[in-house]
Structure formats: C-alpha cells, structure tokens
Amino acid sequence: MPALNYEPVVLKPLTGPLPPLSAIQEEILALKRERNAVILAHNYQVEEIQRVADYVGDSLGLSYQAAQSKADVIVFCGVHFMAETAKILNPSKPVILPDLEAGCSLSDSCPAEQLAAYKKANPGLYVVAYINCSAGVKELSDVICTSGNAVKIVQRVPADREILFVPDKNLGAWVSQKTGRKMRLWDGCCYAHVLFTVEALEKLKNQFPDAPVVAHPECVEAVRAYADEVCSTELMVKFARENPAERIIVVTESGMLHRLRREVPHKTFIAGPTDTCACNDCKFMKLNTVEKLRDALKTLSPQIHLSAETIARAHAPIQRMLDWSK
Ligand code: 13P
Ligand code: SF4
C-alpha cells in the first residue's frame, strides 16, 4: 500500500487550558455585550471564532438557537443560507453575516427557478429540501431537513407521496438507504465533501489502524460505505465521546476538529484526507474571520435582507422541520 505523500493533520489531546483570548477576541466579547448580540457559529468556523461564540453547532442546533434567541442582534458565523434561515425565524431582528460572499456550492447547485420549472413539469411531488439551499428554494419546499434530522423528517412524509429530495444527491442517497424510501434526487453536491476518497483514507488508516472513521453524509457513497459511522457534525461529538477508541479519523471540513478537541479533550483527532491534501477546508466557511466579525459587530453590517413574502413562504417548511424533529 503506497503511503500518503503528505503529513496527516493530527490534533493531539489538549493537555492544559486553552490559550488566553487575543485582544481582538476580547474586543468582540465587549462589542457583543454592548450590542446585546448573540454569536452563533457553525462547527466549520475557524477556531478563533468558535471560541468567542455563544453557541457552536450543526445546522439543526443553530436553527433551534436562532428560533429561541432573546438577543437584539444575531451574528451568524457560517454561510449565507444559514444566516437566511436565522432571518426567516427572526424577521424583526438584524441578522449579520460577517462576509456576505460566504455562499455554498451545494445551495448554488439548485437555483430556485430550476426547481420551480421542475415542479411545474412534475406536479404532485413532495419536496424535502436539505437546509443547504436558498430562501427561494425553501419557499418552494414542503419541509426542510438537516443532516441531523433528515432520516426522521423523510420518515414523516406521508407514504402516498413521491419525494423529491434537493439539493444534495449524496445525503439523499444515504437517507434513502436508511429509510428504505425511494426518492427522486436533485443532482447537487458539496464541492468539498466529494473530494474525500477511499484511496486516501486507506493510506491514512495504514498509519492509524486503530482509529475508526466517522464521515459526513455529504461524502460520496464509497466513502460512506468505508466509514464506521456516518452522521451530522453534531452527532460526531456524540460518536467521539461514546466510541472507546483513543484516536478518530474525521471525514468532514477541518473546523470540526477544533470543536471535537474542545468537547473531547483527551482524544486525538485526525483530519480526513483527499488525494492531494491532508485536510479539507470549505472556502466559503473560511471567508469569515475574527477581523470581519469584529467589524460586523461595530457597524451592524452586512445584514441579511429578505422580502416579507419570502419570509412568510419560507417559514412554513422550516417550522414543519422544527415541529417534526422534536
Ligand atoms: P451539518 O448540519 O452536519 O453541520 O452540515 C452542514 C454543512 O454545511 C455540511 O457541509
Ligand atoms: Fe456548503 Fe459544502 Fe461548504 Fe457545507 S462544506 S457550507 S455544503 S460548500
């Protein structure tokens, strides 16, 4: 078996306390208090942002936090569709995204106009949309799901309805396998998760034979089949806590390793590799930086703006998801 031609990224157990916060991180905390803002951060954000956030989690957890928030301002450190979801759930509050260019290739793979045309040509479909989609696509959907609740949501769809699952064909295929429910799958994917390969994982496994592999369902089928567990980023924390292994290979965006190390400090986390890289960053998630977060809190911009009609129409399928996943 040929070896990897790069050094694996390995986060060793945390032995002492975390390093003190930097001046800019302290500035962010002071501005946050002044603004009565809440900082919600996705697991893929850089570590410096994760450390100043009020909540760090997956798309499902972040949606619940956004729905329950009592803060005056929501600062969302994640990508555009996540901040849009927070705005739909909190129409009267400013929702700030530190970099408005933080998009998502998966969301882009299903433009609302194309979905509208598909629905028109194929009437009667029940549309289950992965939360990684635009507000325009949410408006056209019957229910939203995240990777954390997709199986549960699909199981709740009336049995006599044919499902169209958008936009991720990999998550959709995984849900289909888990539920036994046939679904039409939109031809979309996450540009970052499809880069993980079994070949690279086999080489890494040679170096860490005792380490189980946990993978995100946005990975391709061969990688999902190779993994010991397939789950959302939040459930990866549970897996890391409960699995007896001391070292775990984590096949998702590299920011996840920081969350895992803080939550399960006595274990070692190894980044899932691609054929050319020891770990995999989402270029959109990484557009947010502590400097942009500080400036966003100072200026209360850039904000997410959606029309009242879009908010009203997109709210119903999100609310259905929140109700069905209780
Ligand atoms: P999670 O909901 O599992 O955090 O996934 C979100 C995402 O964008 C994965 O690429
Ligand atoms: Fe979108 Fe993929 Fe980035 Fe997740 S990792 S935000 S699915 S591009």
Image (cartoon, helix red, strand yellow):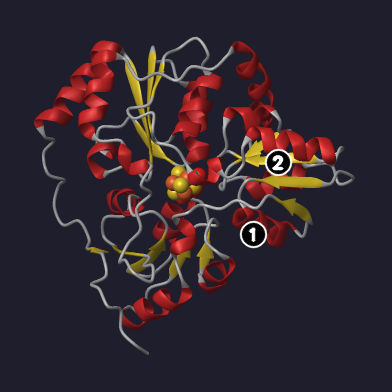
- The residue pinned by badge 2 equals 128
- The residue pinned by badge 1 equals 174
Local secondary structure at mark 1: helix
Residue placed at 27% from the left, 70% from the top? 8
Q: Is residue 76 above or below residue 200?
A: above
| Image coordinates for residue 42, horizontal then vertical, percent | 39, 39
Is residue 178 visible in the rendered image? The answer is yes
Q: Residues within 10 Å of mark 2 (few under 14, many from 20)?
A: many
Circle 1: residue type:
Trp
Residue placed at 14% from the left, 47% from the top? 17
Residue placed at 65% from the left, 14% from the top? 309
Query: Horizontal placement of 244 versus 295: left or right?
Result: right
Q: How many marks?
A: 2
| Image coordinates for residue 146, horizontal then vertical, percent | 58, 43
Local secondary structure at mark 2: strand
Is residue 209 visible in the rendered image? The answer is no
| Camera-nearest residue between 191 and 55 | 191
Q: Residues within 10 Å of mark 1 (few under 14, many from 20)?
A: many
Query: Horizontal placement of 70 versus 8: left or right?
Result: right
Residue placed at 26% from the left, 55% from the top? 265
Mark 2 and mark 1: Cα distance apart in space: 14 Å
Where on the picture, by quarter, is residue 93? top left
Q: Indicate if the residue with disc 1 has its beta carbon within 8 Å of ligand 1.
A: no
